[in-house]
Amino acid sequence: MKKYMEILKKCPLFFSIDEEDLQKMLRCMQAKIVFFNKKYTVLAEGSSARYIGIVLSGSVQIIQIDYFGNRSILGNITQSGVFAEAFACAEAASIPITVVANEPCEIMLIDSKHILYTCSNHCSFHQQLIFNLMRDLATKTISFHQRIHITSKRTTREKLLAYLTAVAKEKNSDSFDIPFDRQELADYLEIDRSGLSVEISKLRREGIIVCKKNHFRLL
Amino acid sequence: MKKYMEILKKCPLFFSIDEEDLQKMLRCMQAKIVFFNKKYTVLAEGSSARYIGIVLSGSVQIIQIDYFGNRSILGNITQSGVFAEAFACAEAASIPITVVANEPCEIMLIDSKHILYTCSNHCSFHQQLIFNLMRDLATKTISFHQRIHITSKRTTREKLLAYLTAVAKEKNSDSFDIPFDRQELADYLEIDRSGLSVEISKLRREGIIVCKKNHFRLL
DNA sequence: GAATATCTGTTGAATTTTCAACAAAAGGAG
DNA sequence: CTCCTTTTGTTGAAAATTCAACAGATATTC
């Protein structure tokens, strides 16, 4: 567990909790670490909402697939990021989304009952954990607002530009990588892949963007 | 303040807090009550993210308006519901949404610093408040997932049917009112109003729905 | 490095949405 | 009740998206 300390200290769930307490806490919560290969399912839609996940290495995608097989990508969680916490915290019966490994990754899974309810040891840092969870959920809510700001645009071009400017703003640079390939970006923006490619080409010809693979630059 | 007790006891922020404590708490937090007429702005985009709002009577809509003036409706908050809590809890500088009164309404506003940080009186129920806030945010996150499930559909018909079946499921009945007029429903589903009317007429002719104004019935 | 699989860009046709404009219906004010 | 305003439904034309199919580019495997 020790080798993951630096990563866990950056996890929003554990802010303001010192390393010693964190070690104790993880043992107390019976945190387990699981490895997944690329494209493997970390949590499947319909499975128990018991677990809260933390990405130790690699990255995962949060996806929704409807009855027709259409995929929506809700987000991308990278190192130190948390996922599935909303369903656990709301004590939902099951999760309405699927989490898949984007690349080989190590995932920490914690049973939410150890987080939501104080253990018999009355860990003093438990209140801090709840507070951190609240902040994390608030941050997630804001990121959903941003996603809606992007996907509510009506045309492919507007969605794409709204997305790219949002990423540029977040990364504080006009030059950046995006965490999606073309099909994934289309599924994130809720548009057709081929239409997306057409629009990227247009923006390139018009001199508005430069891009190579998943690296973009706004001009 | 007393006349609002029954409403506040149903507010997710105050679950498991008894009436006596709640009274004290509200005084301690300097909660203020403001009245708004229909269509008036309760909180404007860009304003301080300091306040958490609670609907005491009437209802409010959470909306986003982009540079072209296109409105997206993110949700509808009714009696005992909470709004703007995510921005306050994440300590955002300003709010990226606008809250407008849907009808005449009474709103309680609480400065979030009184919620997030313990007061000098060390109110014992403060921890419960944080826990409630966390649950509330988790619930909101889930409702965003549901909204995305609806708006990610590609056609007007699919969006409309996904929305109607979701409401029917929530209300546990095939017959229900929706909180939107046609333009608002279009702005919630991210589609064109006239296209929506066309689709409603089609579904009516096909005998899939019955509707009158904002009352719908699925067959 | 050759063979194979995956990803990306392009095209044209079909479908759908958007937009503007108007008429009918419903609601509110006096 | 009548006038006026707002909401809803309808239409056709323009614009945009989706879909299927394919070719070139890029990775991956052996």
Image (cartoon, coloured by chain):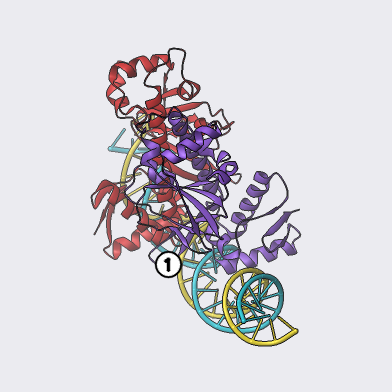
Chain colours: A red, B purple, C cyan, D yellow
Viewer-closest of A84 and A105? A84
Task: Give coordinates of residue A55: x percent, y percent.
Answer: 37, 29
Q: Is residue C28 left or right of residue D26?
A: right
Graded by Cα atoms within 10 Å as few (under 14), some (14 to 19) or many (20 or more), the crowding at tag 1 reads: few
Q: Chain of mark 1?
A: B
Residue B183's place in the image compared with A78, above or below, is below
* Image-quadrant location for residue A5: top left
The quarter of the rendered structure image containing the N terminus of chain A is top left
Query: Can the viewer see residue A48 in this picture?
Result: yes
* Residue located 58% across and 40% down the image: B10
The quarter of the rendered structure image containing the C terminus of chain A is bottom left
Looking at the rendered structure, the secondary structure element under dot 1 is: loop
Q: Is residue A218 left or right of residue B23?
A: left
Q: Is residue A161 left or right of residue B206?
A: left
* Residue located 51% across and 30% down the image: A88
Task: Give coordinates of residue B38: x percent, y percent.
Answer: 53, 63
- Residue identifier under label 1: B69
Query: Can the viewer see residue A184 in this picture?
Result: no
Task: Give coordinates of residue A105: x percent, y percent.
Answer: 38, 28
